[in-house]
Image (cartoon, grey):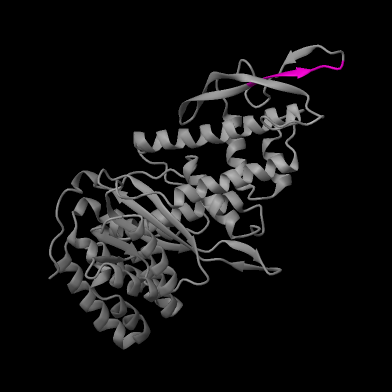
């Protein structure tokens, strides 16, 4: 029995350390075929748009004029475009590469050749890295030029060209943020906030960014919305939820989030009676913050017996024993657990195969870790627009990969009624 108990504790500890890790930068790799075909197609389409956007800026720089622009300094003229295939990690894209003739000093002409997509290049990791670099550069002209420099040797973009590129990327983000969600068929909804460092008013501050991550009927996760707010308050979450409703997202079966009181109030206003799962990892952190250090191991072990119990009935009995003990030894710990109520055990009402995915907001936590890894060389991002572009760029370019939830084949099953 002692051996079995020790093994159980080790398993719980390993799971907890994995969930609560602060320094790990690993993204969920996901099982083979984790991104559905439609998402892969969307990623390829976005990358194609950006590559073609840069190609247009490249040829305009070479010609010294935009399409149909009449200027004395024009160095040549366009003459159509040609189709090219380029193989990326997300698949093959069909590009429209512009064609142009450049005038030489002796009066002769030569065919313009792109530095971004050389004549015989059929695959390129550099293209993807440079496209992502544009997103990660925010609106910093020097950094965008640096991101594209390996591809545009001898054909550097002008400051105005970079500004146009940033504007188009911003339009791309706004289009994504405003897209219709009626066809997404969201079953589960993860909600959490991340706090990147941003420069504001001459100071570096933590900016709350509200994140909505949905789970579709096939188990795939999809990023639904990003929104900056002054504080993680009821009003902020209400704005995000109202935005999801305006974009025709249906009522999910379950919401998984931390214990933010403002979020709970906003959820109740939009979807009264909606099942709500409090993140068990967030709650454990709350309990440990209330407990003396020498009691941490005992609190953690007893708490794990509750959230990793075999049934809801067993979990409730463990909770009763937990409260009875800690009300005497450390009332703050008991009060913190009581505050969560039944919402800490909601996941038990869903298929057991899904419990691991539904008891925490780890999916968003891992996205935040990848975001931090990408911007760790910068003390702070220049503004909130840069934060949104970076996060959006990581997602839409396929750099953030999320696998299906555990037990996705059982999504069709119905949850048990609350006792």
Residue 9, position as x, y percentages in the image? 32, 61
Q: Is residue 337 above or below residue 398?
A: below
Q: Quadrant of residue 239?
A: bottom left
Q: Is residue 265 magenta?
A: no
Give the extent of the magenta segment: 99-105
The tally of labels here is: 0
272 or 417, nearer to the observer: 272
* Residue depicted at 36% across the width and 55% down the height: 247
On the picture, is 339 further left or further right than 69?
left
Q: Quadrant of residue 297?
A: bottom left
Residue 188, position as x, y percentages in the image? 28, 55
The answer to whether residue 33 shows anywhere in this view is: no
Q: Is residue 100 magenta?
A: yes
The answer to whether residue 370 shows anywhere in this view is: yes
Identify the image quadrant of the N terminus. bottom left
Residue 335, position as x, y percentages in the image? 33, 83
* Residue depicted at 16% across the width and 58% down the height: 415
Q: Quadrant of residue 268?
A: bottom left
Residue 206, position as x, y percentages in the image? 58, 67
Q: Is residue 118 above or below residue 321?
A: above
379 or 271, nearer to the observer: 271
Identify the image quadrant of the C terminus. bottom left
Per the picture, the main secondary structure of the magenta-coloured stretch is strand
On the picture, is 234 further left or further right than 321?
right
287 or 133, nearer to the observer: 133
């Amino acid at each position: 029995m002692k051996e079995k108990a020790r093994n159980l504790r080790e398993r719980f500890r390993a799971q907890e350390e994995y969930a609560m890790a602060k320094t790990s930068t690993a993204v969920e790799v996901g099982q083979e075929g984790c991104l559905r075909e439609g998402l892969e197609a969307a990623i390829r389409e976005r990358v194609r748009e950006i590559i073609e956007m840069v190609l247009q800026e490249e040829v305009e720089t070479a010609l010294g004029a935009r399409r149909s622009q009449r200027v004395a300094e024009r160095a040549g003229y366009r003459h159509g475009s040609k189709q090219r295939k380029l193989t990326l990690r997300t698949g093959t894209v069909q590009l429209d590469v512009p064609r142009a003739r450049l005038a030489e000093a002796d009066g002769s002409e030569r065919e313009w050749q792109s530095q971004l997509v050389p004549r015989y290049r059929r695959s390129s990791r550099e293209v993807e890295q440079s496209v992502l670099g544009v997103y990660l550069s925010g609106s910093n002209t020097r950094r965008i030029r640096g991101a594209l420099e390996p591809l545009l040797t001898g054909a550097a973009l002008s400051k105005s060209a970079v500004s146009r590129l940033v504007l188009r990327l911003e339009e791309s983000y706004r289009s994504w943020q405003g897209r219709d969600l009626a066809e997404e068929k969201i079953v589960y909804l993860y909600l959490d906030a991340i706090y990147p460092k941003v420069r504001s008013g001459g100071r570096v501050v933590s900016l709350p960014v509200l994140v909505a991550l949905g789970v579709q009927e096939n188990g795939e996760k999809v990023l639904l919305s990003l929104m900056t707010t002054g504080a993680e308050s009821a009003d902020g979450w209400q704005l995000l939820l109202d935005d999801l409703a305006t974009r025709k997202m249906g009522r999910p079966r379950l919401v998984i989030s931390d214990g933010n009181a403002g979020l709970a109030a906003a959820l109740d206003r939009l979807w009264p009676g909606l099942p709500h799962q409090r993140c068990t990892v967030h709650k454990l952190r709350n309990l440990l913050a209330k407990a003396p250090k020498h009691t941490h191991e005992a609190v953690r072990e007893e708490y794990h017996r509750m959230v990793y119990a075999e049934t809801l009935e067993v979990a409730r009995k463990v909770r009763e024993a937990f409260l009875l003990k800690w009300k005497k030894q450390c009332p703050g710990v008991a009060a913190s657990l009581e505050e969560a109520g039944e919402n800490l055990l909601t996941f038990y009402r869903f298929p057991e195969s899904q419990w691991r995915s539904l008891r925490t907001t780890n999916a968003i936590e891992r996205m935040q870790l990848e975001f931090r890894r990408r911007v760790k060389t910068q003390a702070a991002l220049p503004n909130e627009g840069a934060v949104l572009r970076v996060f959006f760029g990581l997602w839409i370019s396929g750099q953030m990969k999320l696998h299906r939830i555990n037990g996705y084949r059982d999504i069709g099953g119905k949850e048990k009624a609350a006792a």
